[in-house]
Image (tube, coloured by chain):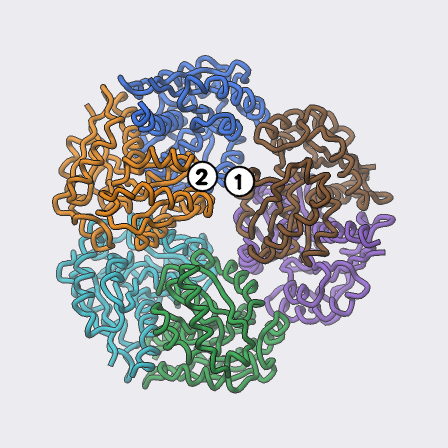
Chain colours: A orange, B blue, C brown, D purple, E green, F cyan
Amino acid sequence: MSRILVINPNSNDAVTAGLDQALAPLRLAGGPVIDCIGLAEGPHGIETQAHIETVALPLARLVAEEEPRTDAFVIACYGDPGIHVCREATKKPVFGIAESGVLTALSRGERFGVIAISGKSIRRHLRYLRQLALDVRLAGERPLDMSVAESASGADTLERMIAVGTDLRDRDGADVVIMGCAGMAKHRAPLEDALGIPVIDPTQAAVTLAMGAIVFSAAHSG
Amino acid sequence: MSRILVINPNSNDAVTAGLDQALAPLRLAGGPVIDCIGLAEGPHGIETQAHIETVALPLARLVAEEEPRTDAFVIACYGDPGIHVCREATKKPVFGIAESGVLTALSRGERFGVIAISGKSIRRHLRYLRQLALDVRLAGERPLDMSVAESASGADTLERMIAVGTDLRDRDGADVVIMGCAGMAKHRAPLEDALGIPVIDPTQAAVTLAMGAIVFSAAHSG
Amino acid sequence: MSRILVINPNSNDAVTAGLDQALAPLRLAGGPVIDCIGLAEGPHGIETQAHIETVALPLARLVAEEEPRTDAFVIACYGDPGIHVCREATKKPVFGIAESGVLTALSRGERFGVIAISGKSIRRHLRYLRQLALDVRLAGERPLDMSVAESASGADTLERMIAVGTDLRDRDGADVVIMGCAGMAKHRAPLEDALGIPVIDPTQAAVTLAMGAIVFSAAHSG
Amino acid sequence: MSRILVINPNSNDAVTAGLDQALAPLRLAGGPVIDCIGLAEGPHGIETQAHIETVALPLARLVAEEEPRTDAFVIACYGDPGIHVCREATKKPVFGIAESGVLTALSRGERFGVIAISGKSIRRHLRYLRQLALDVRLAGERPLDMSVAESASGADTLERMIAVGTDLRDRDGADVVIMGCAGMAKHRAPLEDALGIPVIDPTQAAVTLAMGAIVFSAAHSG
Amino acid sequence: MSRILVINPNSNDAVTAGLDQALAPLRLAGGPVIDCIGLAEGPHGIETQAHIETVALPLARLVAEEEPRTDAFVIACYGDPGIHVCREATKKPVFGIAESGVLTALSRGERFGVIAISGKSIRRHLRYLRQLALDVRLAGERPLDMSVAESASGADTLERMIAVGTDLRDRDGADVVIMGCAGMAKHRAPLEDALGIPVIDPTQAAVTLAMGAIVFSAAHSG
Amino acid sequence: MSRILVINPNSNDAVTAGLDQALAPLRLAGGPVIDCIGLAEGPHGIETQAHIETVALPLARLVAEEEPRTDAFVIACYGDPGIHVCREATKKPVFGIAESGVLTALSRGERFGVIAISGKSIRRHLRYLRQLALDVRLAGERPLDMSVAESASGADTLERMIAVGTDLRDRDGADVVIMGCAGMAKHRAPLEDALGIPVIDPTQAAVTLAMGAIVFSAAHSG
């Protein structure tokens, strides 16, 4: 029985529970177990570069500890904190949700837009896209201008996402949109309906890629 | 019950059967049905640009016909023949295995290598990579210099793939390798063992992405 | 006596006649014959990806048939349908008018703008520019938002082209403009006068390149 | 009667005479007059950056003087000396043979190779290709390692060009080759025969583009 | 005692004096002498391509003459006239202020903006950025729309620079700004205070790089 | 009196002392104080991604603590560990030696080569160059294949550097070379003499840029 471990790098249990729920459709009989855990040492939300650095080594330690009973890892924060050190810590594949979200978006449209939680993260995201050499087909990134807390709880989060997604589609020319945060999965389907173009939840994208990376190997070695 | 339709654009039933077998690990209880069919109008193998053009419209017609009972399509020829006209023919997502193989490889390594069947297809593949804006992280592409028939039947195909893969890894600097053909799936695991770096079967990659594109929507609308 | 064959991939005789007329200035004594023909199997206008695919193989067959009495071919539809399969079908050079128009524009300005017939083709054109690795100096592409029929007959086509060209020049920074359609040649000179920057008719550009490709070889072998 | 003026920026009359002869096939009844002149102030050959700078202003002065009786200019030195100041000096189009050679090569193959006279010019050519944003499809550039004088007179120039062109084709993957010098036109056809891929003479390419730039306007205003 | 020679390629003594004053903070006991001279043959201001060409060879002659008593050269005109011919004329390092300004800006921010004197120079600057392969992180360039004379004397130059710098920061997303002219140094600090992001004077940037290029070698050979 | 603080992120005092000595030529009367300190929490050498992550937060804390008495910071490890979190921790400029080394090299040559300590770091360096969008002019990177300890002490380090530098120059086409490590400064001058092209010590490059960033502001506010 193979296992995918999804690690929410913050210590916000509500976010972890939300991830867990969002991944239910990929839990299939005979398929990999998908576990979601938070990072006890993590901050309540990851909003700064310092937050990103804070979680990198704890993530790598957790990955090393869990390796014997895990076949693939997902780091569930849009920004892929610690991705390189986690990859160094294990022979098993490690997926970041930002990287996975962009790669998946590129299979669904010509040019992708990104909905960011806050404007401050956009410069960081662009830098990361350049590192991945995946910036050419970026249509644009626009912020919700909400805190993580607001975006999680607020009743008008979906409304705001539709407004931002509409700008990405109509002003920037995006024909696929990525929700640039780990905690927005429940809005994916209604946002997609409202915009009329594919909307990618990056955690679902990463877990899908993780599944593909292990089911065929498991079949081979099983 | 959702369904992924994998279309082998050639009329070689052995290839279709091989695809079918290679995808078995993704057939999970409760998950999408994965059907593989060949294209009656297709040539025995797709080796030229004329072959590619020959199958484009028949693929689009097949996609349009199958749309009512299909949730996602995969065009299973490395070269993604007819991908744009198929996407125009349906609202359902359509995945090409070349595009999917490259995107998946980018989640597994810094720079990807490609094993091509024949040297003649390499120029075409490079052109397509530029179109996708995914050429920056290409380490190199090298041919097996075998016909499709030889590569399918030949006892020494794996040996030749290991030699070519070793060159991609050691001379070109690839840390992940894509098998640039629809009919090589059975060699994936032994090739990966021999090279010690991830090896991507592009059809498995595409069907995985297709699964991710539909299971979450199905859950939403179900 | 060498010969350039210009093939209008649609079956609209008025467009073919317009091409024929637009190329008259290149018909010089002692120079190549320039013939223009339509494609009987072609649609009345090429507006979709399906139209593009429909004409690819008929174009290749026509090219193969005409090869013995032709020295260079021009595919006269902005989108270069079938260009790769036509090149595979003959040893003689084959020019697409989109590719030729962009290359010629790059010899006349720093950044080029494109006037498209319809907004739907722009995404396709951008994809093609990436494939050619000629997208860096694109200033922008803007649509006329007219049907091919309207643009051909409408009295206010030139007026609309001037408005769109002005936006390309003043908002997007283009210093050369390509008319992104095979049927606009008669508007080239007045549009150029109105904008004050070079305007490229892509069919004239392609036939010019074709002429250069053959007159020197003809001199050599003659 | 329209006129193209080809300026050889050096004072070597043999080179000017060679250009004149190489362009004969484009002198057609009813077409533009094509005149070739040398630059009295120019050095015997252009081999250094100082040579390039030496000719820039004299070229611009000549262009300004000849403007009233000229419709298009060609600067016939691979390196396009003074191209920007010449363009500033006239409203008429000015073509550089390096730029024109590359643009024309891109219409004939996927990746172009360049045969340089000397290794010292290669770094300069690469810098210029980056400026033009036309470097992506460069397969490679290799030197003859001959002086301009040697390459002009030497009996074994063609032999050496075939050797270098073969390396460009077989080691670098070029499927079209540019002769990176103004004085090699007589070798174009035999080199093309030997290599089996298109060979571009850049002066012929530039004069062709110049012809295209004026014959249609002349027809309009005539 | 090592020496940096800063050459103002125009003959405007007020500009030369301004450069001299702006560099005072880098004149440190034990460090290199920093001399500023104008170019007698230069125009009063460099505003056209012809101006640029006019100064190239005189600059190279001056560099060659001064080489025996100079350790590094700076060409102090944003546009780097004659940079390549000057580098050819000496073994000593030669710095252009445009190149140095951009490189220095890239050490201070993610995306740089440029304040140009006039709109006419922007196209030239962009071409040069492409040549340097440093255009990817350009946020934008905007003109003051003043003559060199106005910008030097005008009381409202700073006010206008703040307005343009604010647009670069807020509309184009620049987080560092380069003053695209040799004569603006006195505005650097107040502009930086007003914008709240780093502002680069390109001459100061070039002289700094020149200092780094020689002090360590001088220590070695001294 | 302004101050530049150079932080060696490892705890190897010999390396810190070497940096201190290498920077002596920039300590000029009236200029900034240049202090070098090690990081007590750092590993003995930085060779893995885990080492990089280990020092990021301690570096940021040190930067925050030293900010009141520091005007510019330099992180002296080729790999720029913690650069983004340090920049977030202070308003003062922070320079990484890898970034500074590359920017400085781009002012001295057309294409730069990098001498890496070990082959394992090369992939990381390339990723970083892509992030900086400074990879286009990379000629190549080649390893010494020595441990940090060996390279520091070994008598044959210089000999090995000359061999690697020669390959970068002759095989890869580099005309400027960066020593990709903080501890090689003493080899800079002899290596430059041996290769005949500029050799950049990245720490010296970064401290030079730091000096330029503060001396002009200090003059303004002083």
Label 2 neighbour load within 10 Å: few <14, some 14-19, many 20+: many
Image quarter hosting the C terminus of chain C: top right
Q: Nearer the viewer, residue B36 or B189?
A: B36
Q: Nearer the viewer, residue D91 or A56?
A: D91
Q: Is residue A48 found left or right of D125 in the rendered image?
A: left
Image x and y of residue C198, in percent: 68, 55
The residue located at (59%, 25%) in the rendering is B50
Q: Mark 2–mark 1 contact, CB under 8 Å?
A: yes
Chain designation of label 1: C
Outermost residue, front direction? A155
Rendered view: B11 above or below E16: above
Image x and y of residue B156, in percent: 40, 21
Res F130 seen here: yes
Image x and y of residue E18, in percent: 46, 84
Label 1 neighbour load within 10 Å: few <14, some 14-19, many 20+: some
The residue located at (19%, 74%) in the rendering is F69
Location of residue E23 by image quarter: bottom left
Rendered view: D21 above or below E157: above
Residue position for label 1: C123
Chain designation of label 2: A
Marks 2 and 1, how far apart in space?
10 Å
Q: Is residue C169 found left or right of E217 in the rendered image?
A: right
Q: What amino acid type should be assigned to the residue bearing mark 1?
A: Arg
Image quarter hosting the N terminus of chain C: top right
Q: Is residue E201 found left or right of C8 in the rendered image?
A: left
Q: Which mark is residue A185?
A: none
Q: Secondary structure at mark 1?
A: helix
Q: Nearer the viewer, residue A54 or B14?
A: A54
Residue position for label 2: A175
The residue located at (68%, 38%) in the rendering is C150
Q: Nearer the viewer, residue A174 or C104?
A: A174
